[in-house]
Structures are given as C-alpha cells and as structure tokens.
Amino acid sequence: MDMVSFFNVRRPKSVTSNSKNGFSALSITASQEDDEADSGNHVRLKSPRWFSEFSSIWPGQAHFLKVENILFQGKSQYQSMLVFQSASYGKVFVLDGDLQLTEKDECSYQEMITHLPLCSIPDPKKVLLIGGGDGGILREISRHSSVEEIDICEIDTMLIDVYKEYFPNVAVGYKDSRVKLHVIDGTLYLKSIERGTYDAIIVDAFDPIRGDHELLESEFMEVAARALRGGGVMCIQAESLWCGSLDIQKLFSKCRQIFKGSIDYAWTTVPSYPSGVIGFLLCSTEGPYVDFRCPINPIDPSSCGISKQPLKFYNSEVHSAAFCLPSFARKATSSMMKPKNST
C-alpha cells in the first residue's frame, strides 16, 4: 500500500470554503519548531515540510519533495486529493497518497502518451480518453487538427474542478469545443458504444500496467479493442523498465491475443516518478499495420491547439527514440513486436 507522510507539519488552523467549486482549501503556515532528526535514518529535515512517497512496488526507497505551502486538501466521494506548492517542481497534485502530476515535468508524460499513438496513424478523427481528468491529455489531443471528436470518461467531477482551479494550464484542455465529458465508468462506456467507434483510445485511469496486472484478466481490454476500428490504436501507461515486476514478454503475449495487431513498448523520463522513468504500452487492432516507431502523422511543432503554448517535450526524433530499449529489455521485445501476418 502506498503511503504518504509529512514531516515537521502542524494541522491546519483554518479551512476556507470555495462555494463555486464545492471544495475546501487549507491555509497552513510552516512550523516554527526546531529541526527534528529522524533516529532511523539520521536525516535532519527542516521547515517547511517535506512530502514523502514510498510504495511496496519500489521497496527500500522514497521520493521527497520540499513543501512550501499546502494549497488544497479535500476528499470526493471517490478519493482524497492534495495540492501543494513545492520548492522545485511547482505545484504538485497528489491523489490517494500517490503523486500524480507536477508542473515541472507533466509535459513529458502528457505529450508522449498522446502523440505516440496519434502520430502513428493517419488523420485520427475520433479519440477517446479514459481517465486523464486533469485535462492535460485533452490539451495535447487538441493539437491534432484532424481530430473531430474528443470524448473523455471521468467519474470524479470534483477532481476536474480542483485541476481547473489550481492547474489551469493543464486543465485548459476542457476548453476545446470538440471535448465531450462523460461522467461514467470507462468500462461501462466502452460496453455501450458500437464496435469500431474510435481511431484511438488513450487510457490514463489505472496503475501502470504489468504482465500480471489484474486489468489484463478483466473485460476492459477486450471491450477497448472492440471499440477500435481496424488498425486503430490504444496507448496505456505501463510500468517502468526498472520495475522488477515488469515482464514485457508476458505483457506483449497477453495483449497480442486481445488486439491481434502490433504491440510495442516505449518510455519517457519523468523525474518525479519513482525511477524517473514511465513506460507506455501501445497496441493496434487487426487491420492496416501500425509501426509505432515511425510517426507517419507528424505534428507541427508550432501547433498549439487550445493550449496557446508550443510542445515542450515531444518531437518526431523523441518519438522514435522512445522505443530504443536497453539491452536487458530489447531481447524481450524484438521477436514480439510485429504480428505474424504483417508485411
């Protein structure tokens, strides 16, 4: 179970209501107490506070961010949320104790999970986002002028409101007129639509997928594949190359049985994530062959979409380089990328 702790922190003295969005923001001042030493690891932590994230998936390590001010803390009917101003990563969003996003490095994740699939197929027109309630992936989809419809499934409207309030440059994606919000569970939505509805599906709603992930045993992947047209693509966050539980060969084998097309694994750097690396699993359905490594639908670097800001991380060279794997991972993928009937 993931755990979060604050060191040298006092409980909030006041809570102010924000009636517009229906949530509360906390006003907390830094502790004036003397520095305290941790006898277990001999680390002396100073005011202001420190945020710590550690998980059983990454034993023996923790990631710390210096907290300058807590901006918001609340709980919806689904999950708890925390927003704080950090000393070096800008504003930070934490969900149920897990760090979700920082202003400093959100661009690498949002841009890559979006443009890796959308730049790999010609002229995508209908795109579905499952999760991604922060709006950053919507912001990136908006850069593609060929896209006519952008649907998003997000069940927690309070989460959306918090992002709009504290991360407007991320949540700007909701301002795109092509976006339609469906407040519904992603699996239920997929089951309700016609086969072959979408050109691309981007999934940002689950823990990073691994070969033994429960998602692979559920109906989600089956209904996602069904919702894609022939040669349609799906991109979902996968575990880091450095995670001991990542079995790329097993992951590819299971997804090949479901999607019937090409399967590949890419990665990007996200400094605030454990190991500094996040992976992506890309799958295509049976139909026109998709070579994820060669972007055939390159995006204009100056294309801003609804963002009004150019790309910060993604470009065609980074796209292709994202599939270059270290030797220990390359062996597992080289024989399994291409479907047997492809040419």
Image: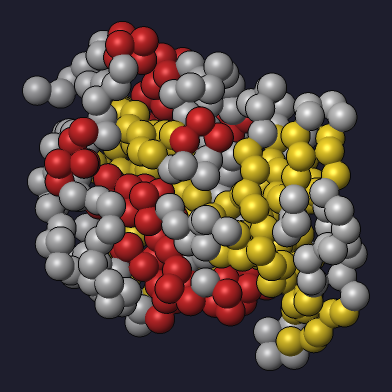
Which residue is most to the bottom? 20
The quadrant holding residue 126 is bottom left
Residue at 87%, 70% in the rendered image: 12
The quadrant holding residue 24 is bottom right
Which of the two residues, 219 or 181, is positioned nearer the viewer here? 181
Q: Position of residue 305 (x, y in %)?
A: 25, 73
Residue at 84%, 26% in the rendered image: 40
Residue at 86%, 53% in the rendered image: 34
Q: Position of residue 23 (x, y in %)?
A: 75, 79
Which of the two residues, 94 or 179, is positioned nearer the viewer here? 94
19 is higher (above) or lower (below) than 258: below
Left/right of residue 248 with respect to residue 140 in the rendered view: right
Residue 128 seen from this side: no
Q: How many marks?
A: 0
Which quarter shows the N terminus? top right
Q: Position of residue 276 (x, y in %)?
A: 47, 35
Residue 179 seen from this side: yes
Which of the two residues, 15 or 162, is positioned nearer the viewer here? 15
Left/right of residue 289 with respect to residue 111 in the rendered view: left
Q: Position of residue 42 (x, y in %)?
A: 79, 29
